[in-house]
């Protein structure tokens, strides 16, 4: 049997299996690393950068006796393989600041008006904003004006909240085998589209029971006739902050 392998995450020893990424090993060990586009059931995608960590920073002593920290490389922990002995920093001020900035950028790019959003209290973007202590949007609001698609009998799409994580795209392609969604455009015109001649969801074979109908981490893909069913104080992230119970985001074990 080969030796068990470990790396260090914020100085804590984390075991990992060959082939696991840093975030997979961390979540399996009960350590939360913020993320939005990572999902344990899908191939990592590496777009949101919320899971960024620093790897192998060094401390050196200069000629005049000063101790200086040389930052290691920044990397997305969802796409970076775990390696034995590496030192990973996640909960350090510079990385937490970077994550706060990323969340602030996402909050102003879309219309994330939480008080009127059905996903409030179970939205990963909102949950991370609370967890990271984001107190204001900091950047000017973009005020996107993307038309809502209500053409499907059971599902409503509010594209103004899309964070382009591609989870619905991956779920529709890999699990549902329907390829209902795709991203189109570049830069700040990049947006989610539906794969039908009219471009409307109602003209696809999408179903409310599809995996893609139930993976959106924010409030884009909403089920009609279901809204505000859970009272304030009992919603998912009212009960426990997003960083509690990291096991819920851990890799799904293969059934043998
Ligand atoms: S609709 Fe939701 S799941 Fe799909 S890309 Fe946008 S945010 Fe991600
Ligand atoms: S979770 Fe790693 S880049 Fe999005």
Image (cartoon, grey):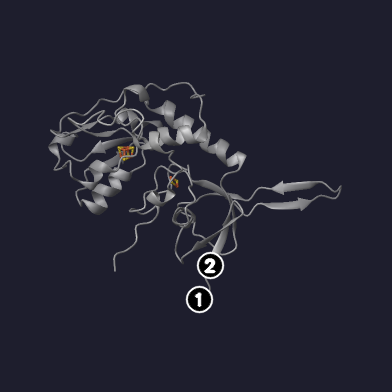
Residue 155: horizontal and vertical position, in percent? 19, 34
Q: Nearer the viewer, residue 23 or 256?
A: 256
The residue positioned 61% from the left and 39% from the top of the image is 93
**Residue at (43% x, 28% y) in the render:** 107
Cα separation between marks 2 and 1: 9 Å
In this rendering, position of residue 182 left or right of residue 106: left
Q: Residue furthest right?
A: 64
Q: Residue at x 33, y 53 (%)?
A: 41
Sort mark 2 into few (<14), some (14-19) or many (20+) by Cα contacts within 10 Å: some
Q: Are marks 2 and 1 in contact (CB under 8 Å)?
A: yes
Q: What is the number of the mark on residue 127?
A: none
For the C terminus, the image quarter is bottom left
Residue 181 visible in the displayed image: no
Residue 5 badge: 2
Name the foreground residue: 65 vs 189. 65
In this rendering, the answer to whether 35 lies above or below 229 is below
On screen, 32 above or below 150? below
- List the single residue furthest toward the bottom: 1
* Total marks in image: 2
In the displayed structure, does residue 74 sit left or right of residue 179?
right
Give the image location of residue 52, x and y in percent.
52, 46
- The secondary structure type at the circle numbered 1 is loop
Point out residue 162 in the picture as x, y percentages from the top left corner.
34, 33
Secondary structure beneath label 2: strand
Q: Is residue 194 visible?
A: yes
Residue corresponding to mark 1: 2
Instruction: Give the crowd class for mark 1: few <14, some 14-19, many >=20 residues within 10 Å.
Output: few
């Amino acid at each position: 049997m080969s030796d068990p392998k470990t790396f260090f995450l914020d100085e804590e020893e984390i075991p990992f299996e060959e082939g696991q990424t840093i975030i997979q090993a961390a979540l399996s060990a009960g350590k939360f690393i913020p993320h939005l586009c990572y999902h344990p059931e899908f191939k990592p995608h590496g777009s949101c950068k919320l899971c960024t960590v620093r790897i192998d920073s060094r401390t050196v002593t200069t000629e005049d006796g000063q101790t200086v920290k040389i930052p290691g490389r920044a990397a997305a922990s969802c796409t970076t393989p775990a390696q034995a002995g590496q030192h990973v920093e996640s909960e350090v001020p510079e990385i937490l600041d970077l994550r706060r900035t990323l969340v602030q950028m996402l909050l102003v790019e879309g219309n994330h008006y939480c008080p009127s959003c059905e996903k409030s209290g179970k939205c990963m973007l909102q949950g991370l904003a609370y967890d990271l202590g984001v107190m204001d949007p900091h950047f000017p609001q973009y005020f996107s004006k993307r038309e809502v698609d209500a053409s499907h009998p059971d599902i409503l799409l509010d594209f103004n909240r899309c964070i382009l994580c591609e989870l619905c795209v991956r779920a529709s392609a890999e699990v549902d085998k329907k390829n209902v969604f795709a991203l189109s455009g570049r830069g700040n015109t990049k947006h989610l589209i539906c794969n039908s001649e009219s471009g409307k969801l109602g003209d696809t074979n999408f179903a409310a029971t599809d995996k893609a109908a139930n993976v959106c981490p924010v409030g884009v893909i909403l089920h009609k006739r279901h809204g505000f069913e859970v009272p304030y104080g009992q919603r998912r992230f009212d009960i426990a902050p997003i960083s509690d119970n990291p096991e819920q985001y851990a890799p799904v074990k293969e059934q043998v």
